């Protein structure tokens, strides 16, 4: 659908420069189901991909269903960052105002409605209003928004006081408001203050601090890892409000991301991953290891890796880290291979320098509070 911004609809096996953005320095990007946004260092916002649901702004060519090369999204002040859901986007401008555009289904645009309507008289088929021009989310207009996150059908945002707001589809308790109702405007979660937040497909997670009954925020100890929604397997009860993941107590949490059903956290000098029904190696446990885990488990091959950023897709994980031959030199290398068939690609793994897949045997800190993740992923008592 043109979401790569390369001027065609061909699958690429490896990284390819976006020619249309040459000379336009990019600071960040975000991806939805069939579209991509790029934030320029100038504050400009560019988009490519599926256009019929308003995901690329109002400037698209109405005669086609996609923009194969990036176009500029107009109607915004200078942009600081963006996040993308399935068919919508959230944008934070440099003044801390939150904007939204795209499909209004489930109320993800935060404007008070899900935009549902019947396509024709007597029809039971529903359609949803498309908002191609970015609009301010009025419920948060008096707040300075510092971070936002989007799942396929729900959203979260943080203000400069750490207050966490959620809205959109409420299934499985992913909004954290103790029920499964859809909410069409940002609504605060009173249990905590957060410093970062991420949305999975049917759950949400945040690093933050508890709010005491007195209303004060508990900053006395380390931050905690909160989760809510369908955080375990489908056969287990959902967490209907933010709860602390006990296995991560005592860790110095730095950064994390949520995929469709998996979570990856950087803590101290370790990478920790878990998720139910993972089958594509997205947890990074290594060849011959189990592919899914209901409880947090260290990625032994990445021990001592200094991580600066984690990103998760539907069934894959990317980690941006400092180059360290002691760690990365032992990892296998994957070389993408572009095959001759249009839209097809593959790759091959090459052996690592030294023993393939060998892990650095780092140990966690011993000082209290005691970490509850053992090397094999089992909890210590």
Image (spheres, rainbow, N blue to C red):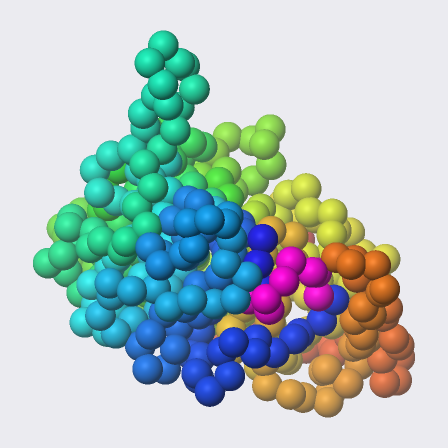
Q: Residue at x 47, y 67 (%)?
A: 70
Q: Toward which corner of the image does residue 26 lie, by quadrant?
A: bottom left
Task: Specify whether 185 is left or right of 174.
Answer: left
From the viewer's perspective, is 194 left or right of 126? left
Picture coordinates of residue 117, whole percent (x, y): 31, 25
Residue lying at 36% horizontally and 33% vertically, measured from the top left: 128
> Is 66 located above or below residue 300 in the figure?
above
User: Is 36 left, or right, of 147 in this rendering?
Assistant: right
Residue 210, picture quadrant: bottom left
Q: In this picture, which residue range is highlighted in magenta?
A: 5-12
Q: Is residue 306 magenta?
A: no
Residue 54 visible, this angle = yes
**Place of residue 29 in the rendered image (x, y in percent of width and height, measured from the top left):** 46, 69
In the rendered view, would you say 364 is above or below 159?
Answer: below
The spot of residue 72 in percent (x, y) is 37, 68
Picture residue at 60% right of the left edge, 69% below the top:
6
At a point 49% along the width and 78% down the height, the residue shown is 21
Where is residue 237 drawn, in percent x and y? Answer: 50, 30
* Residue 22 vertical position relative to residue 371 in the rendered view, above or below: below
Q: Main secondary structure of the magenta part?
A: loop
């Amino acid at each position: 659908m043109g979401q790569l911004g390369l001027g065609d609809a061909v699958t690429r096996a490896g990284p390819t420069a976006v020619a249309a953005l040459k000379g336009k320095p990019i600071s960040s990007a975000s991806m939805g189901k069939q579209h991509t946004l790029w934030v320029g260092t100038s504050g400009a916002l560019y988009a490519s991909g599926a256009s019929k649901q308003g995901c690329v702004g109002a400037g698209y060519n109405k005669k086609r269903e996609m923009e194969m090369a990036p176009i500029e999204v107009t109607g915004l002040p200078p942009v600081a960052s963006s996040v993308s859901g399935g068919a919508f986007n959230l944008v934070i401008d440099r003044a801390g105002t939150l904007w939204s555009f795209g499909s209004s289904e489930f109320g993800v645009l935060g404007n008070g409605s899900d935009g549902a309507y019947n396509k024709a008289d007597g029809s039971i088929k529903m359609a949803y209003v498309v908002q191609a021009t970015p609009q301010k989310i009025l419920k948060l207009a008096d707040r300075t928004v510092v971070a936002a996150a989007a799942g396929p059908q729900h959203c979260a945002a943080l203000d400069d006081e750490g207050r966490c707001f959620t809205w959109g589809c409420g299934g499985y308790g992913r909004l954290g408001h103790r029920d499964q109702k859809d909410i069409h405007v940002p609504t605060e979660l009173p249990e905590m203050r957060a410093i970062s937040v991420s949305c999975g497909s049917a759950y949400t997670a945040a690093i933050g601090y508890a709010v005491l009954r007195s209303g004060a925020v508990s900053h006395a100890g380390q931050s905690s890892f909160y989760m809510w929604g369908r955080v375990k397997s489908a056969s287990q009860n959902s967490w209907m409000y933010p709860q602390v993941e006990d296995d991560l107590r005592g860790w110095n949490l730095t950064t994390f991301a949520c995929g469709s059903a998996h979570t990856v956290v950087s803590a101290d000098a370790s990478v920790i991953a878990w998720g139910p029904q993972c089958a594509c190696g997205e947890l990074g446990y290594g060849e011959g290891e189990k592919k899914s885990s209901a409880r947090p488990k260290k990625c032994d091959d990445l021990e001592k890796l200094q991580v600066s950023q984690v990103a998760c897709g539907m069934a894959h994980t990317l980690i941006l880290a400092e180059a360290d031959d002691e760690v990365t030199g032992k990892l296998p290398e994957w070389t993408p291979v572009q095959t001759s068939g249009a839209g097809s690609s593959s790759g091959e793994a090459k052996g690592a320098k030294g023993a393939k897949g060998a892990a650095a045997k780092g140990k966690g800190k011993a000082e209290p509070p005691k970490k509850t993740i053992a090397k094999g992923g089992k909890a210590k008592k």
